Amino acid sequence: CDNFTDLNLSHCFLGTSLYVRLLLYTRANPACGRELHHQRFPSEPLFNLSRPTAFVIHGYRPTGAPPVWIDHLVRLLAERRDVNVIVVDWNRGAANLNYLTAVAYTREAAHNLTGFIRSMQEEGASLDSMHLIGVSLGAHLAGFVGANLKGKIGRITLDPAGPLFTSATPDERLDPSDAMFVDVLHTDMDFGLRGAHGHIDFYANGGADQPGCPKTIFAKSYFVCDHQRSMFLYLCALNGTCSLTAYPCASYADFLDGRCLQCEAFKPASCGYDVIQWRESLLKLGQTKAFFSTTASHPYTLNYRVDMVTWNQYLRWGVVYIRLHSGRNVTEARIDSKLLRFEQFTSTRLLAQFDEDLPHVHKISLRINTGNVIGPRYKIRLLRIRLTPLERPQRPLMCRFDIFMEENTEVAFRPLS
C-alpha cells in the first residue's frame, strides 16, 4: 500500500518543499492506496476513468501528521458510490510552521492537479463528474483548480480557510464560478472564511463558535475544534447517522426566532454530500444562505419547532425552558437567544434544541421565566402548544391545548399525538 505522507514537528520546523502525491482508493481497495503516476496513470488497472472521481484535498498541516479524518472519509465515499477516490497528498508543502509558505504552495499544487485532471480529460474522463472536497487551504486549492478549468468541474465542497483570504478578490479564493456547483459549510469565523462563497453556504450554529469547543486560547484544541467540526459534520451526514437539515434564511437570528422553519420558495436542504439533489433549484435561486443548529456531539442535531398561542391579560417578556421526559431520562432546551413577547392571543414560533434524543416522550415540562421576583405571579394561558420534530419526520407531532400556568413556575403535562 502507498500511505499518506507522515511527517513530524522537526519537518515543520525545518520547512518542507512542495511535493504532490496522488493516492487512489476504490471499492476494491478502500484501505490500501495506490500512488498514481502523473503521466502514466492509465496503466493502473483499478483506475476506471468511466467512473466519477472524488478528489480529497487536505489543508494546512502545522504538525505534519496525517489528518485524523482522511481514512474515514475515503471509506465512506467508496461505500456511498462506485467512484475513484483520489487523496491529494501535499503534506510536503502544507507542513510548514510558516503558514504563508503553505498558502503560497496552494497555487503550485493547484497547477499540478490541474495538469493531472487535463490528462484524465484527454483519456476520456468527464469534468462534470468530478467532485473536489477541499478542507481549509484545500478548499482554496480546489477553487484554483476549478478556475484553471474555467469552472467546468462538477462540484467543489467544504470549508475554505480564512487567514489571508478574508479580503481576497474572487480570483484569489474559492468562489461560485470555480465549479458548476459549490457548497460551503461554515463552522469557524476565526480560521474559516466569513461571508458567502458558494452557490449555497451552510452555517452550523451561525457559522462561528461550535458547541463543545473551548472558548479560551489556552485550551489545547482551541485552534482546531471549531474549524475541524465542518469535516466531522460532513462525515456524520455522509454515513447517514446525522440528519443535518438546514433552512434558507436571511440571518441566524431570524432562524433562531423560527422565522425560516417553513419556506415556500425553497424547501429545507440536507447539508453535506446529498445537497447535490437540490442543485438545479439552488442554481435558479442564486447564492443561498442556509442555517442549522447542532449539539456538541454525535448525532449533533435534535431540534423541535415549537408553536405556542398565548392568552394572558398582561404583556410579559421572558425566556422559555422545555423539558422532555422519558422514564427517568430528561433532556432540556433553553430558548434564550432573546426575550420573547407574550401577550393576548399571540402566536409564537421557536426553535428548541435538545442534547439527547428521547424517542418516547411521555411528559413535557414548560416554564416561562420573566424575571419577575417582586409582587404577584401573573398567570399565562396557553391556548395551544405544538412540538414538531424537525429531523425525525416519522415521529408524531406532540400537542396540548388550554394550559394554565404561572410565570417562573414549571407546569407538566402529557402530550397528545
Image (cartoon, helix red, strand yellow):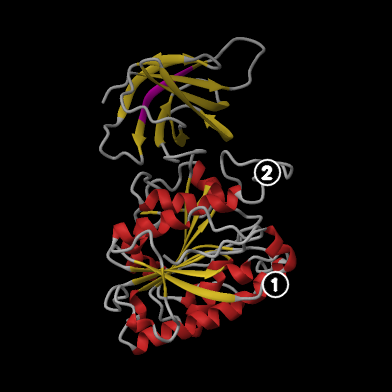
Name the image quarter holding the N terminus.
Answer: bottom left
**Nearer the observer, 240 or 310:** 240
- The residue shown at (61%, 46%) is 209
Who comes first in sequence, dot 2 or dot 1? Answer: 1
Residue 302 drawn at (x, y percent): 41, 37
Q: Which residues are magenta?
A: 380-386
- The residue shown at (38%, 82%) is 41
Residue 268 drawn at (x, y percent): 37, 52
Q: Residues within 10 Å of mark 1 (few under 14, many from 20)?
A: some
Which residue carries the number 1 mark?
Answer: 101
Q: Tell me the CA gap for discs 2 and 1.
A: 24 Å
Q: Is residue 265 at all visible to an observer of this figure?
A: no
Q: Mark 1: which amino acid?
A: Thr
Q: Is residue 123 left or right of residue 346?
A: left
Residue 390 higher or lower than 126, as above or below: above
Question: Does the magenta segment cover residue 382?
Answer: yes
The image's mark for residue 220 is 2
